[in-house]
Image: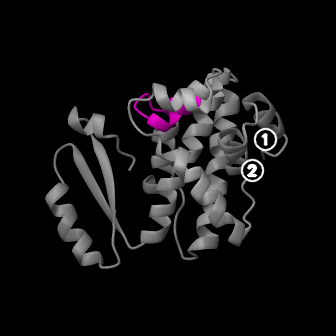
Amino acid sequence: GPCHAEEVALGRLSYLTVACNDIELARKFTSMLDGKAMKTFVSTDVHGIEYAGVLKNIYAIASGMVHGLKAGDNYQAMVISNAIREMARFIEAISPRERQICDSVYLGDLLVTSYSRFSRNHNFGAMIGRGYTVKAAMMEMEMVAEGYYGTKCIHEINRKYNVNMPLLDCVYRILYERCPVSLAFEKLSTELI
């Protein structure tokens, strides 16, 4: 990413990053995808990009919850700016190496997933922020919000690494411990920097 399939189908300019340990193989593959409306990049950061792809869905749920709570653009921007720092800390702990977290495959994908009307995870979070239960929001969705499952997965992985992840913890409490959304975000607001 950043790349929503809906925009690819509409022929809108889109960007993909192909991650592979074999950079030449990645280049051959991207040459088949490149076109007028599709631009590609290559990377060898397979693990970092995979984890970023899971984390951005979790943070998009948080962004959607803020939207559903009508907490405002200022607060939503603060949540997302903290999300990229949290993502960087976690990925560095899991897969330490040189990377630019502001590259499109990390930050750009996080932004499009957190703000787009096409984002299943944002929409799922927005429903919960508006008062839907997790179960009701899941039933209302026509597609899967991967961040729901990713939240539990990353939360369990982080038990080993113990990275400071207040956003992940906030979303986990809401989705899996039935913490009221407003209460969880009230606590989170004291932890944002």
Q: Amino acid at mark 1?
A: Leu
Residue depicted at x 64% and y 48%: 83
| Residue occupying the point 45% across, 63% down | 49
Residues packed near mark 2 inside 10 Å, few (<14), some (14 to 19) or many (20 plus): some
Residue 98 position (above or below residue 186): below
The amino acid type, in three-letter code, at marker 2 is Pro
Q: Residues under labels 1 and 2: Cα distance?
A: 7 Å
| Residue for badge 2 | 166
The residue segment tinted magenta is: 115-126
Q: Residue placed at 75% from the left, 60% from the top?
A: 164
Lower sequence index among marks 1 and 2: 2
Q: Judge from the rendering whether residue 168 lies leftward or rightward of residue 188; answer left or right.
A: left
Q: Position of residue 61 (x, y in %)?
A: 57, 38
For label 1, the SS is helix
Secondary structure, mark 2, is: helix
Is residue 122 located in the magenta-colored stretch of the structure?
A: yes
Circle 1 residue: 188
Residue 7 in the image: x percent, y percent? 29, 35
Please tell me whether the stretch drawn in magenta is mainly helix, strand or loop. Answer: helix
Q: Residues within 10 Å of mark 1 (few under 14, many from 20)?
A: some
**Image-quadrant location for residue 163:** bottom right
Residue 34 picture quarter: bottom left
Residue beneath the point at 54% across and 60% down: 101
x, y (%) of residue 130?
Answer: 63, 20
Pick whichever, 175 or 189, lies toward us: 175
Q: Where's residue 50, x and y in %?
A: 45, 62
Assess whether mark 2 and mark 1 are in contact (beta carbons under 8 angstroms).
yes
Q: Is residue 182 magenta?
A: no
Instruction: Give the image's coloring scheme.
Output: one colour
